[in-house]
C-alpha cells in the first residue's frame, strides 16, 4: 500500500481548503494525496456532526435572540401538534449556523462585481446571512418602534406580530437601511424551518418534536420490513443521529 | 508517440525476466521452495513495513512487555543478515539464538519454527539470500528494563521453550500430519490463536483456543462446534483461508493480512491439510450457555440500537450478506469468551480482506463517536445472545479500554 | 514554478463514473494511468458513515458532498441581451465533487437513450418533414442504438441495475417498457419491491391504457456480484439517496462497482485534492502534451501523458476545453465554433394529488424506486398533428420524506403559522407526487462560453450559460402536463395540483443536474466537438467523455447513456486507437 500523507482531510479542513493559498502555512493543511495499490481506509475515521449544546449566544445579542425567538414562535406556533419554534430550539440552531460556514457564506461565490440581477439569477448582494440577520433584525425592530408605539417586535402581541410578519412576507413593509423585507422574511422562514425539521443534533427540533408530529422516523436506515405494508402506519418512533430514548440504559 | 506501444512491450519483457533465475536449476528449485516457505511462515507480515522494500524491517510490534521492531532480514551486510551463516539462521529459527549468540525474543515465533524440518529451513535460507539487500538499520529491542536484557530470554526459554522438529503421528493420515506441521510449525497459527501465559508463551494445554493480541481477539480455531470452527465444513475452511470469506464470516484485521500475504497464496493441498487438522482438534466448552433472555434490560436497549444502526447491513435476522456484510447469527467470532474484537470493530471500524476472489474490501464504519460505552456493551450483548447465539454479556467497563 | 512529473501513458481528469470506467478498461489494457481529481478521496465506511449519512441538513441542504461555488461557480443569463451574473450558490443543478463525482449522490435512474435519439435529426426529418424542426439545432450523434447496445449492457451489468426488460431482441416483454429499443437480455436484477405510491400510480395509469413499468434503478433490489467480482448489498429504502452517499453499498457508484478493483492495480494512481488548470497543447495545437494541475498547497505540477481523457462533469469538460484552446468556442451569431454548442437541459413539470384516506409512508423510499410511463416520451407517439417534437417520461418516483425539503401542502396553504402546521401534518403522508421529465432540444441561442467578467480563485474565467427553455420544449411540456392532469384526476384524490413549465429558466430552485452538450459528438467537425468515439476533432489524443457529448437531451436521466458512452470510447481506444496512437479515428 502506498499512500503519501496519510492525514485524512476532515470535512472542516476541506471546506477551508477553498482558500488554500492562505492555508498553506497553517497548522493542518490539506495535502494532495497520491493513492495507488490500496483502497485507503483508516480506523476510527469518522467526521460526525458535533452536538450543539445550549448555553449562551455565539452570534446573536440578547435583543436579537429575543426578536428571533418571537419570530420563531409565530412561524412555528406552539399548539397541540407540537411545541413552538422558540422552545424547539430554532434560534439556538440559527445562532450556531450563523457563526459557521453558512453564516459567513464561506462556501459560496463571493467575488465581485456585485450587480443587481434578475429573479432567475438568484441572490446577488454581497451581504452574508450573518450580516443580513444583523441588519434585518435591527431594521425590523426599528420599524415596529416607529409604527407600533415604540415597541420592539418581541414586545408586540402575537396577533400584531403575525400582522407584521404577513406584511413582511408580502413585501408591503419598507424596512429602513434598505433591508429588503420580503427577502429577509424568506431567509428567516427558511432557517427557522431548517432548525425545526433538522436533526436535533444541530440545536433545534428538541426531542425530535417535529418528526414525532409528522411521523417521520428520522435517521433510520432500513425499511425492508415495512415496504410491502402499503397504507399502514409505520410503528417505530424516530431516531436521531444521537440515538433515541430506546437506546438509553436504565 | 510510440511510448504506449513501448510500455506494452516492456511489460511483457519484465514478466519473463522475473522468472529467469541466473542459478542452476536445482538451486532455483530450492529458492522457489524457500520462497514458498516464506509464504507459509508469512515472514513479510512482520518484517516488511507498509510501502517499504520487502523484508527490510517491520512496524513496531506491541507486546505486553513493550515494543519490539522486527529486524531487517535482507542480505545487507551492514544492517541485515548479510553476515550471517546458514548455521546462524538455523539457530535463530530453531533455537531462538541469532548471530553472535544473541537471544531472540519470542515475538519471533521460533517456538513454532523450531518444528520446521531442516530441509524447509535450508530452502528458506536459500531464498532469503536472493532478496534485494536493503540498508535499513533497525534497533529491534525497544523493551523497557528488565525485558531489554536479552539474557533474560534464557530463563524464559527454560520455562517456555521446547526445541525440536515436528514429529509426525503415524496413526494419522499424511494429510493430517501435513496440516499439523504447517499449523504448529511454519504457519505459527498458535502465535495468535493460542492463549498466552503470564510470560507471553503459548498456553500449550489450550492450543488454538483463542488469544488476545494488539487489541484483537484471535478466536478459537479448534474443531469445537460452539466457539470454534466445528460448524464449518473443510471446504468452507479452505474457502476462508484462500479468499477471506466463506459465507460464515469475512476476515478483517490481522487475519485479513495473514490471508492476503500467506494463506491465500498457499498450495490448495496445504490449505486442505490445515482444514483437516484444525477440524480434528478439540478445545473449549462445547455446550452453549443459556442465552441472556430478550426481556433483559440490556438486551432491549441492544435490540433498539441494533435495529437502528446495524440491521441495514447485517440484516434484522443477523444473517448479513455474503462477501459484503458478515453474518452475526451463528458466528463463532461473535460468541468468543472475549469480546475484544467485537468492541474494536464497533468503536474503530475495520476494513475487510481483499483477495482476488473477494475484491469488494467493504469496511465496517467506526461508530465509537455515536455509541457510549453502555450502548456498545448493550448492542454487543444483544448480538451475542440473539438468533441462537449465546455468550457472556459485555460490560460497559470493558469498552473504555478499547477507546 | 511548475514541477514536471514523470510521463504517464494516460492522464484522466476526474475520477467519477466515466473516469473510473476508462481507468479500469485502460489499465486492463496494460496502460499506466493516473487520474487527477479535484475533490477528496471518499469511501463508504468513512464518508457515508451509517451513523450520520442520513443527515438532511448537512447533505441535503448544505450539500456537503457537492461542488461548492467558492471552488468553482458559473454565471448565467436567459438570453444574450442580458448580463450574466454568477450563481453565487448552486440551486437549479448541483455538480458533484470528489472521488465518485456526482455518481456518489445521484438517484440511480438508469436509462438507455433510443435509436430515435441517436439519429434524431434524420429520424424527425423523415417522419415529420424539415419544417417541423427548423427552429431547433438537432443533429445526429454519429452512432446508432444497435451500435450502443452492448455498451449499455456492460454499464447495466457493472452497476447491477434492477429493472424489467420491455423488449428483448424484438420480443415485447410483459411488464417492461414496450417503447424501448431491443436489448440483448434482461437487466441483471429484477425490479425493486414497490412502495405504495408507485403501485397506485401503476394501477391508475394502466387503467388509462398507458404502459407503466418499474423505473430501471441503480438502487439494488437484491445482493449482487458484478462482473468485476465486486459485491453490492440490497437497498434498504432508507430515503437518504439523492444528495447522499450510500452507507450500505447498495447504490451503484464508482465506489461500489469499480474502485475496489481499480485501486489495487499497480498501473493506476489517483491524485486527489488536485485541480487541473488546463490541458497543455504543443505548438501545433493538434497534440496534447499533458495537463497542468495545482494541489491544495498551491504547488503547480505538469503531468506529461500520451493521452488526455477529460472525464470531469460535462460542464467542467467543456470549460477545460475552452481554457485549453482545444477547438474553437461556439459563436451563436455566426454559428461557427463547436465548443459550447448545443447546451441542453431538462424540461420538467410536476403534479401532486392530495388524499384524505391514504398513508404513503414517504420516508420509505429510494432514489430510483418507482414507476415510469414512456407513452409520451421521445418519439414513442405520433407528433403528426402536434406542434412540437420531443416528449417526457412520466415518473412516480417518490424519493424521500425528508422534512426540511419534502412537506407538500395543498394550494392556498399559508407558509407558516397554525394553519400551515395543520395542513403540513395532514398532507405529509397522504400526498402522492409525480412528474414529467421532458426532453431538451438544442437551439442556436442556447450555449456555453467563458464569462467576460467573473473569474475563479485562479483568475480563470467562469463558464457562462446562456439558456432558456425553447418554445418547442415549452409546448411539449405543456402538452404532457395535460396528459398528467388526466392521470391526476383519475387518482380520485381530494384535490390535485399541476405545475406547468414556463419560460425563463430560473437558476434558484432545484430542477435537475442533467446539463448536457457543449462538447457534442457528431459526424461533422464543423458542428461537433468530438467524433462518434468521443475523440476531439481538433486534438486527436484528447477524448472528452460525459454528458458533454450529448447532441441533445432526451426525456430521461443521462447516466445510463453516459456510462455506455464511456464503455464505447474505452473499447475503441483499446481496439483501434492504440494501434495507431495520436491519429484521428474518423477522418474529418
Image (cartoon, rainbow, N blue to C red):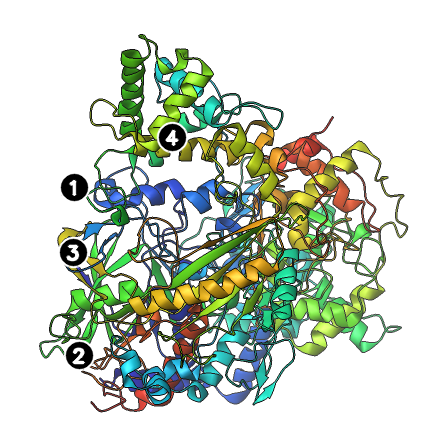
Q: Nearer the viewer, mark 4 or mark 3?
A: 4
Q: Position of residue C342 (x, y in %)?
A: 26, 72
- Residue underneath mark 2: C287
- Say if labels 1 and 4 share a chain: yes
Q: Quadrant of residue C251?
A: bottom right
Visible in this render: residue B385? yes
Same chain? Circles 1 and 2: no
Q: Which one is in front in this view, the residue at disc 1 or the one at disc 2?
A: 1
> Do tags 2 and 4 sit on the same chain?
no
Residue contact between numbered discs 2 and 3, judged by CB atoms under 8 Å = no
Residue C430 in percent (x, y) is at 62, 47
Q: Nearer the viewer, mark 2 or mark 4?
A: 4
Of the pair B165 and C119, the residue shown nearer to us: C119
Which of label 2 and label 3 is nearer to you? 3
Residue topped by disc 4: A188
**At 63% across and 34% down in the image, what residue appears?**
A212
Residue occupied by mark 3: C460
Task: Measure the C-alpha gap from mark 1 to mark 2.
Answer: 40 Å
Amino acid at each position: 500500500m502506498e499512500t503519501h500523507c496519510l492525514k485524512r482531510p476532515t470535512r472542516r479542513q476541506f471546506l477551508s481548503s477553498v482558500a488554500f493559498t492562505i492555508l498553506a502555512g497553517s497548522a493542518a493543511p490539506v495535502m494532495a494525496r497520491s493513492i495507488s495499490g490500496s483502497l485507503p481506509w483508516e480506523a476510527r475515521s469518522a467526521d460526525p456532526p458535533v452536538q450543539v449544546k445550549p448555553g449562551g449566544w455565539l452570534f446573536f445579542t440578547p435583543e436579537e435572540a429575543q426578536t428571533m425567538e418571537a419570530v420563531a414562535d409565530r412561524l412555528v406556533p406552539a399548539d397541540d401538534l407540537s411545541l413552538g419554534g422558540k422552545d424547539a430550539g430554532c434560534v439556538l440552531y440559527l445562532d450556531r449556523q450563523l457563526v459557521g460556514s453558512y453564516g459567513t457564506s464561506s462556501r459560496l461565490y463571493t467575488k465581485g462585481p456585485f450587480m443587481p440581477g434578475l429573479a432567475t439569477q438568484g441572490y446577488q448582494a454581497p451581504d452574508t446571512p450573518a450580516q443580513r440577520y444583523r441588519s434585518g433584525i435591527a431594521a425590523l425592530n426599528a420599524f415596529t418602534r416607529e409604527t407600533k408605539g415604540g415597541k420592539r417586535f418581541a414586545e408586540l402581541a402575537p396577533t400584531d406580530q403575525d400582522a407584521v410578519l404577513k406584511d413582511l412576507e408580502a413585501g408591503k413593509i419598507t424596512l429602513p437601511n434598505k433591508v429588503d423585507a420580503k427577502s429577509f422574511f424568506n431567509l428567516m422562514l427558511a432557517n427557522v424551518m431548517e432548525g425545526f425539521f433538522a436533526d436535533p443534533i444541530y440545536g433545534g427540533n428538541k426531542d425530535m418534536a417535529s418528526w414525532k408530529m409528522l411521523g417521520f422516523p428520522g435517521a433510520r436506515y432500513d425499511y425492508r420490513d415495512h415496504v410491502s405494508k402499503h397504507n399502514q402506519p409505520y410503528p417505530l418512533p424516530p431516531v436521531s443521529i444521537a440515538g433515541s430514548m430506546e437506546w438509553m440504559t436504565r | 508517440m510510440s511510448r504506449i506501444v513501448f510500455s506494452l512491450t516492456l511489460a511483457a519483457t519484465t514478466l519473463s525476466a522475473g522468472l529467469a533465475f541466473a542459478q542452476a536449476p536445482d538451486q532455483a528449485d530450492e529458492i522457489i521452495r524457500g520462497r514458498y516457505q516464506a509464504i507459509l511462515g508469512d515472514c513479510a507480515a512482520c518484517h516488511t513495513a507498509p510501502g517499504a522494500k520487502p523484508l527490510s524491517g517491520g512496524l513496531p510490534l506491541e507486546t505486553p512487555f513493550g515494543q519490539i521492531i522486527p529486524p531487517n532480514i535482507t542480505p545487507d551486510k551492514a544492517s541485515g543478515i548479510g553476515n550471517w551463516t546458514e548455521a546462524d539462521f538455523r539457530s535463530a529459527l530453531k533455537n531462538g539464538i541469532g548471530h553472535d549468540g544473541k537471544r531472540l525474543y519470542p515475538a519471533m515465533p521460533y517456538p513454532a519454527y523450531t518444528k520446521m524440518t531442516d530441509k524447509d529451513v535450508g530452502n528458506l535460507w536459500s531464498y532469503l539470500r536472493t532478496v534485494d539487500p536493503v540498508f535499513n538499520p533497525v534497533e529491534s529491542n525497544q523493551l523497557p528494563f528488565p525485558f531489554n536484557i536479552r539474557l533474560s530470554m534464557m530463563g524464559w526459554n527454560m520455562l517456555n521453550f521446547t526445541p525440536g522438529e515436528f514429529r509426525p503421528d503415524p496413526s494419522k493420515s499424511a494429510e493430517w500430519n501435513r496440516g499439523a506441521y504447517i499449523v504448529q510449525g511454519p504457519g505459527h497459527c498458535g502465535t495468535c490463536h493460542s492463549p498466552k501465559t503470564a510470560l507471553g508463551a503459548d498456553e500449550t494445554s489450550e492450543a488454538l483456543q483463542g488469544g488476545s493480541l494488539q487489541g484483537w481477539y484471535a478466536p478459537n480455531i479448534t474443531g469445537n462446534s460452539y466457539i470454534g470452527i466445528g460448524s464449518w465444513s473443510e471446504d468452507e475452511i479452505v474457502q476462508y483461508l484462500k479468499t477471506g470469506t466463506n459465507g460464515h464470516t469475512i476476515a478483517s484485521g490481522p487475519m485479513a493480512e495473514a490471508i492476503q500475504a500467506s494463506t491465500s497464496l498457499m498450495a490448495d493441498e496445504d490449505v486442505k491439510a490445515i482444514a483437516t487438522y484444525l477440524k480434528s482438534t478439540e478445545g473449549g466448552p462445547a455446550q452453549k450457555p443459556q442465552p441472556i433472555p430478550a426481556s433483559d434490560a440490556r438486551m432491549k436497549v441492544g435490540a433498539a440500537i441494533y435495529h437502528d444502526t446495524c440491521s441495514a447491513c447485517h440484516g434484522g435476522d443477523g444473517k448479513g450478506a455474503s462477501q459484503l456484510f458478515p453474518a452475526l447469527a451463528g458466528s463463532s467470532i461473535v460468541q468468543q469468551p472475549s469480546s475484544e474484537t467485537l468492541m474494536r470493530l464497533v468503536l474503530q471500524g475495520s476494513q475487510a480482506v481483499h483477495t482476488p476472489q473477494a475484491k469488494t474490501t467493504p469496511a465496517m464504519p467506526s461508530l465509537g463517536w455515536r455509541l457510549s460505552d453502555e450502548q456498545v456493551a448493550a448492542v454487543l450483548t444483544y448480538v451475542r445472545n440473539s438468533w441462537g447465539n449465546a455468550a457472556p454479556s459485555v460490560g460497559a467497563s470493558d469498552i473504555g479500554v478499547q477507546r | 514554478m511548475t514541477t514536471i512529473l514523470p510521463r504517464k501513458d494516460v492522464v484522466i481528469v476526474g475520477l467519477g463514473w466515466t473516469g473510473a470506467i476508462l481507468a479500469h478498461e485502460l489499465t486492463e489494457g496494460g496502460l499506466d494511468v493516473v487520474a487527477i481529481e479535484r475533490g477528496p478521496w471518499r469511501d463508504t465506511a468513512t464518508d457515508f458513515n451509517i451513523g450520520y449519512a442520513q443527515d438532511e441538513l448537512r447533505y441535503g441542504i448544505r450539500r456537503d458532498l457537492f461542488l461548492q461555488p467558492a471552488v468553482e461557480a458559473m454565471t448565467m443569463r436567459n438570453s444574450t441581451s442580458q448580463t450574466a451574473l454568477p450563481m453565487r450558490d448552486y440551486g437549479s443543478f448541483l455538480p458533484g465533487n470528489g472521488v465518485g463525482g456526482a455518481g456518489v449522490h445521484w438517484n440511480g435512474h438508469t436509462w438507455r437513450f433510443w435509436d430515435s435519439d441517436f439519429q434524431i435529426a434524420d429520424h424527425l426529418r423523415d417522419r415529420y418533414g424539415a419544417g417541423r424542426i427548423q427552429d431547433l439545432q438537432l443533429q445526429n450523434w454519429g452512432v446508432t442504438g444497435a451500435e450502443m447496445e452492448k455498451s449499455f449492457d456492460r454499464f447495466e451489468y457493472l452497476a447491477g441495475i434492477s429493472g424489467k426488460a420491455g423488449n428483448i431482441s424484438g420480443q415485447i416483454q410483459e411488464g417492461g417498457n414496450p417503447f424501448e429499443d431491443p436489448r440483448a437480455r434482461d437487466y441483471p436484477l429484477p425490479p425493486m419491491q414497490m412502495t405504495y405510491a408507485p403501485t397506485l400510480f401503476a394501477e391508475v395509469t394502466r387503467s388509462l391504457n398507458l404502459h407503466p413499468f418499474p423505473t430501471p434503478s441503480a438502487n439494488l433490489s437484491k445482493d449482487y456480484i458484478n462482473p468485476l467480482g465486486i459485491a453490492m448489498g440490497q437497498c434498504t429504502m432508507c430515503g437518504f439517496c439523492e444528495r447522499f452517499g450510500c452507507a450500505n453499498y447498495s447504490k451503484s457508484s464508482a465506489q461500489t462497482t469499480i474502485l475496489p478493483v481499480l485501486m489495487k492495480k499497480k498501473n493506476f494512481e489517483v491524485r486527489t485534492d488536485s485541480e487541473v488548470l488546463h490541458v497543455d497543447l504543443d505548438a501545433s495545437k493538434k497534440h496534447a502534451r499533458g495537463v497542468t494541475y495545482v494541489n491544495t498547497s498551491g504547488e503547480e505540477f505538469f503531468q506529461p501523458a500520451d493521452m488526455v481523457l477529460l472525464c470531469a462533469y460535462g460542464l467542467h469538460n467543456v470549460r477545460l476545453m475552452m481554457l485549453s484552446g482545444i477547438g474553437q468556442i461556439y459563436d451563436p451569431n455566426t454559428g461557427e465554433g463547436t465548443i459550447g454548442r448545443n447546451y441542453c437541459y431538462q424540461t420538467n413539470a410536476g403534479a401532486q394529488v392530495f388524499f384524505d384516506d391514504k398513508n404513503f409512508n414517504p420516508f420509505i423510499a429510494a432514489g430510483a424506486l418507482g414507476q415510469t410511463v414512456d407513452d409520451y416520451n421521445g418519439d414513442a407517439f405520433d407528433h403528426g398533428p402536434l406542434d412540437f417534437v420531443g416528449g417526457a417520461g412520466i415518473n412516480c418516483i417518490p424519493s424521500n420524506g425528508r422534512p426540511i425539503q419534502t412537506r407538500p401542502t395543498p394550494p392556498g396553504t399559508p407558509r407558516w403559522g397554525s394553519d400551515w402546521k395543520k395542513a403540513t401534518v395532514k398532507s405529509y403522508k397522504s400526498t402522492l407526487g409525480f412528474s414529467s421529465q421532458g426532453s431538451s432540444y438544442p437551439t442556436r441561442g442556447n450555449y456555453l462560453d467563458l464569462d467576460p467578467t467573473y473569474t475563479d480563485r485562479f483568475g480563470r474565467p467562469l463558464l457562462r450559460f446562456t439558456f432558456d427553455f425553447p418554445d418547442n420544449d415549452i409546448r411539449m411540456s405543456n402538452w404532457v402536463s395535460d396528459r398528467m392532469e388526466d392521470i391526476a384526476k383519475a387518482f380520485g384524490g381530494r384535490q390535485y395540483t399541476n405545475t406547468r413549465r414556463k419560460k425563463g429558466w430560473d437558476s434558484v430552485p432545484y430542477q435537475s443536474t442533467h446539463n448536457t452538450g457543449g462538447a457534442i459528438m457528431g459526424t461533422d467537425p464543423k458542428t461537433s466537438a468530438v467524433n462518434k468515439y468521443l475523440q476531439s476533432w481538433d486534438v486527436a489524443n484528447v477524448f472528452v467523455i460525459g454528458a458533454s457529448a450529448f447532441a441533445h437531451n432526451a426525456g430521461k436521466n443521462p447516466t445510463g447513456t453516459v456510462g455506455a458512452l464511456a464503455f464505447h470510447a474505452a473499447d475503441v481506444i483499446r481496439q483501434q486507437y492504440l494501434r495507431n496512437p495520436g491519429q484521428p479515428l474518423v477522418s474529418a
